[in-house]
Amino acid sequence: MNNEELKEKINGWVSGVEFPENKQYLEAIVPAESLHKLAKLLKDTSDTSFDYLFCLSGVDYGKQFGVVYHLESTTLKHSLVLKVKTDNRINPVFDTVCDIWRTAEWHEREVFDFFGIKFNNHPDLRRIFLDDNWVGFPLRKDYKDDFIIER
């Protein structure tokens, strides 16, 4: 399936998806409330068959937090980058996709640990790298570290 066909398919499933132009991979910015539905359809539908989540990353855009999902179909040989964003910097929350791609369970824990982004329905959302008593989220742009001297 080519990128135009993927866009049509996605637009038929959920509304409000944006497709930025001039990107290396097809990107779809998805409304947060549609993320889980779209992810499930992308994996389970035979003509999309995105069976491989090879990267999940948190992002602090400054005014927004986001999560980026790099997907590939190992059988159909196409790829897609899904993005979700939220303006809520106090309590950023998205739905988990670990019930769709098991590898997301660990990646979502990492994003929670370093950015404080929570994932609804995650089976074991707790810190994975930092101590339980660590205060703050070190990959946030507004994180203050007592050991770093600003010049």
Image (spheres, rainbow, N blue to C red):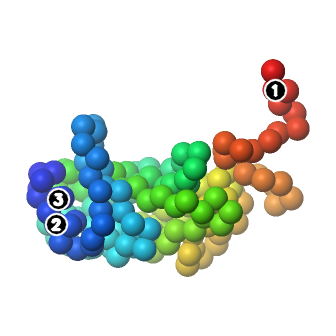
Q: Nearer the viewer, mark 2 or mark 1?
A: 1
Q: Are marks 2 and 1 in contact (CB under 8 Å)?
A: no
Cα–Cα span, label 1 and label 3 = 46 Å
**Measured from the top left, where is residue 34 in percent x and y?**
37, 72
The secondary element bearing badge 2 is classed as helix
> Is disc 3 surrounded by few (<14), some (14 to 19) or many (20+) residues within 10 Å?
some
Sequence-first tag of 2 and 1: 2
Task: Judge whether residue 106 can be spotted in this image.
Answer: no
Q: Which residue is mark 2?
A: 9
Cα–Cα span, label 2 and label 1 = 49 Å
Q: Are marks 2 and 3 in contact (CB under 8 Å)?
A: yes
**Measured from the top left, where is residue 1 in percent x and y?**
11, 56
> Is disc 2 surrounded by few (<14), some (14 to 19) or many (20+) residues within 10 Å?
some
Residue type pointed to by label 1: Glu
Question: Along the line of sight, which residue is nearer the eye, 56 or 30?
Answer: 30
Residue type pointed to by label 2: Lys
Q: Which residue is mark 1?
A: 150
Q: Which residue is mark 3?
A: 6
Task: Tell me what residue is drawn at x 55 percent, y 54 percent.
Answer: 65
Question: Along the line of sight, which residue is nearer the eye, 4 or 114?
Answer: 4
The secondary element bearing badge 3 is classed as helix
